[in-house]
Image (tube, grey):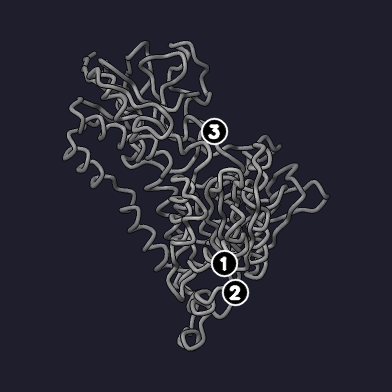
Amino acid sequence: MSEREYDLIVIGAGPVGENVADRAVQAGLTAAIVESELVGGECSYWACMPSKALLRSGAALRAARDVDGAKQAVTGDLDVAAVLRRRDSMTSNWNDSGQVEWLEGAGIDLVRGHGRLTGEKMVRVTADDGTSVDLIARHAVAVCTGSAALLPDIPGLADIEPWTSREATAAQSIPASLAILGGGVVGAEMATAYASLGAAVTIIARSGLLGGTEPFAGELVADALRESGVTVKTGVDATGARRDDDGRRVLDLSDGTTVTADEVLVATGRVPRTSDLGLETIGLDAGSWLDVDDTMLVRGFDWLYAVGDVNHRALLTHQGKYQARAAGDVIAARAKGDEVDDAPWGAHVATADHDAVPQVTFTYPEVASVGLTAKKAEEKGLNTRVLDYDLAHVAGSSEQSDAFVGRARAVVDLDRGVLVGATFVGPDIAELLHSATIAVVGEVPVKRLWHAVPSYPTVSEVWLRLLETLGRDSA
């Protein structure tokens, strides 16, 4: 068995692993990245990119139909085959040659196969043909293996071969009917997409849609889904699953009713991809989330890092890439004996993971949020004021759509006079979020925000309306 030595070994070549390796190499280290599937990872092939491709065509069609003068030009429905072709192009037809070429250009070695820790700073990679190579890290190993769909313990569920997000985003045809278990981001987005593509969709969400966001966000999305023909069932659980005589999937629900569909999508949560990683060889539990400090160093180790979903801090691609930049830089700094900037908001920490995480859910309407919800701010003991405004009353909204429905909320910490959270719900409001993110992260005084004048007529004018709701002398 051969051995190869590097400064850094990264397990997992998704966007998080790529960024860890790239930052370290740019700082002068050598790095190898290990991947058992496609270089580019979940986001490129089974999550962010294909899901948004499936959603975009329906969103564009609806936007046209909501504007008089444009809607008269719309004479048909979506071309499903064309939507799927566009989705395929967004995934490069599940071919990672372009990503491999990028690794080569970045000076990062790719080792194909399943990586498993065998001891301190040691990773054994086993290829599909059974051959193995031992990789030895001089300084660090970074685990960037991400997460996988959770299959809940429902009798018979495994036997009906349900979809996970992977099958939903990679489907080559649209089933006549789809039942979705779970009302989180994946469930809500796929309900939106598949309804627009012609499927009869039922979503089963025990606690409602988009839990963890402001309650009005999930309510507005649920209303829009129902309007588009989706059956939204809340307050019920699936208690069993089976196939009927025709081979269709049947879900038994806790209220005594059943849902029958051609396919069932399970979207009830995520689990870490650490069950076959060799964690037990270094004293950790197989299958566990990896607890890290703000530099992404696994607690109790001085060489093991866990970056992205696998550390369970913020299961979002952009947040994982943010962590990766900090991790790659701090690995290089520690390897070279340079000063580590690990104070809050320093160059080598992921401080934003705690209370400044932005997220967009690409449903109709879109949901964009950053920072604390009103409930979370209250739980933290902050002295806050919650500002609400109907986005349909902003001039830019009426210019954009004849059927605009939306809402904005800002959460202000009155003691410090700064914004600590914001949520926007409405059509095409995703690009509105970054201004709020800057205000939260930068702790921009609310009094100064009065001087950030929004252009007219744009939806951004909601900032002025929120400030007027607060009052100039209130913060």
C-alpha separation, residue under disc 3 versus residue under disc 2: 42 Å
> What is the x, y in percent for residue 14?
35, 38
> Would residue 240 appear left or right of 7 to someone viewing this image?
right
Q: Amino acid at mark 3?
A: Val
Quadrant the N terminus occupies? top left
Residue plotted at (45% across, 67% down): 454
Q: Up-down: is 175 above or below 118? A: below
In this view, the mark in front (3 or 2): 2
- Contact between marks 3 and 2 (CB within 8 A): the answer is no
Left or right of residue 251: residue 292 = left
Quarter of the rendering containing residue 124: top left
* Mark 1 surroundings within 10 Å by alpha-carbon count, few (fewer than 14), some (14 through 19), many (20 or more): some
Question: Residue beneath label 2, please?
Answer: 393
Q: Secondary structure under badge 3?
A: strand
Q: Are marks 1 and 2 in contact (CB under 8 Å)?
A: yes
Determine which of the numbered discs, if any, sits on residue 271 in the image.
Answer: 3
User: Residue 266 or 319: which is nearer the viewer?
Assistant: 319
Crowd rating for badge 2 (residues with CA inside 10 Å; few <14, some 14–19, many 20+): some
Name which of mark 3 and mark 2 comes first in the sequence: 3
Name the residue located 69 percent from the left edge and 56 percent from the top edge.
Answer: 260
**Kind of element beneath mark 1:** helix
Label 2 secondary element = helix
Residue ID for mark 1: 465
Q: Earlier in the sequence, mark 1 or mark 2?
A: 2
